Image (spheres, grey):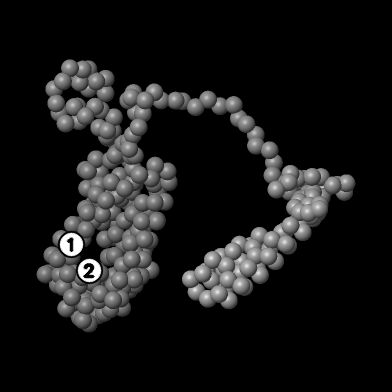
Amino acid sequence: MSELRPSDAEGVVDLPAGTAAPMIAALGITLGFAGLVTHWMVSVVGIGLTVAGVVGWFREVLPHEQHERVPLRPPALRPQPVRVVPRAAALLVPGEQGHRLRLPVEIHPYSAGLWGGLAGGAAMAVLAVLYGLVAYGSIWYPINLLAAVAIPAMAQYSTEQLAALNVGALIVATIAHVIISIFVGLIYAALLPMFPRRTFVWGGLVAPLVWTGLLWASLRVINPLLDARIDWSWFIASQVAFGLACGAVISRSERIPTMQSLPLAARVGMEAPGIAAEKRDE
């Protein structure tokens, strides 16, 4: 291809003219060889296309190369030159501490996930009880509805039965709520360090909306009777309350540096010369 050549008219550049001749010649060559294993007429068509493509191709460049004028963009719409900022980067020497680390470098302790899960569970329970009082005039309705996840027969209860006290359902719902809250809290403690920025958004909004959407899509198949009884607007609000409370407790906890920057001998607890000094430095 020839280089760009400015023409006499300002704002216009001469470029090689476009042509389909090379593609026609390539198709003819392909058909010419395909006819060797199919039918001789395929080769005849291929030879004809090859001749047409080659002749058309040469007419574009001989005796003079064909060009077309392409208008340039106005100067205001053209890409601006890159501005170089003289900044120095801090380079790490291979082999020194911190040269290659796996993220996250610091993590939250498991206790933070435990307390965060309990705090989120308490916030979610408050909204659930408030929903029961507002919608059905009973704090037992959301509790019995949660117990129906473990006791499928309760999904067929009437509204009056779900609004009444059921000691067995209360025990099942309390145990399930505490276990699930702690489990999700531990997951939060493990995942939040991987999102060093905007942990409030990830933990308080994105994560609750994601698992609420998954539950909404699957519950109508797993237990449609229970799905019909859930008020999803209140359910989403309770999940967001859990995420905000759990994320706030975990994000305020002290982070623990991982041991990945220590030598292998120190990580496995081996006694070796020089290990004690490195531990003291840490």
Q: Residues within 10 Å of mark 1 (few under 14, many from 20)?
A: some
Q: Is residue 71 visible?
A: no
Residue tagged 1: 176
Q: Amino acid at mark 1?
A: Ala
Residue 185 place in picture, x, y as percent: 26, 51
Contact, CB < 8 Å: mark 2 with mark 1? Answer: yes
Image side of residue 61 versus residue 258, left or right: right
Determine the residue positioned at 34% across, 23% down: 96
Q: Is residue 112 above or below residue 59?
A: above
When asked about the image quadrant of residue 124, the answer is: bottom left
Check the image and report above or below for 206 versus 194: below
- From this view, report whether residue 29 is shown above or below residue 68: below
Looking at the image, which residue is at 41% across and 25% down?
Answer: 92
- Residue 216 visible in the displayed image: yes
Instruction: Decide which of 264, 14 is in the foreground and name it.
Output: 14
User: For the residues marked 2 and 1, what is the alpha-carbon distance in whole angstroms?
Assistant: 8 Å
Residue carrying label 2: 146
Which is nearer the eye, 108 or 247?
Answer: 108
Residue 170 vertical placement versus 73 (above, below): below
Q: Residue at x 17, y 69 (%)?
A: 150
User: Percent position (x, y) of residue 141?
Assistant: 24, 72
Residue 120 x %, y %: 28, 54
Question: Could you tell me which secondary element the residue under label 1 belongs to?
Answer: helix
Q: Residues within 10 Å of mark 2 (few under 14, many from 20)?
A: many
Q: Residue furthest right?
A: 8
Report x, y in % for residue 57.
71, 59
Disc 2 marks a residue whose amino acid type is Leu
Q: Given the current orientation, which residue lies at the most extreme left position? A: 168
Q: Which mark is residue 194?
A: none
Query: In the visual, does 41 lie left or right of 155?
Result: right
Q: Quadrant of the C terminus?
A: top left
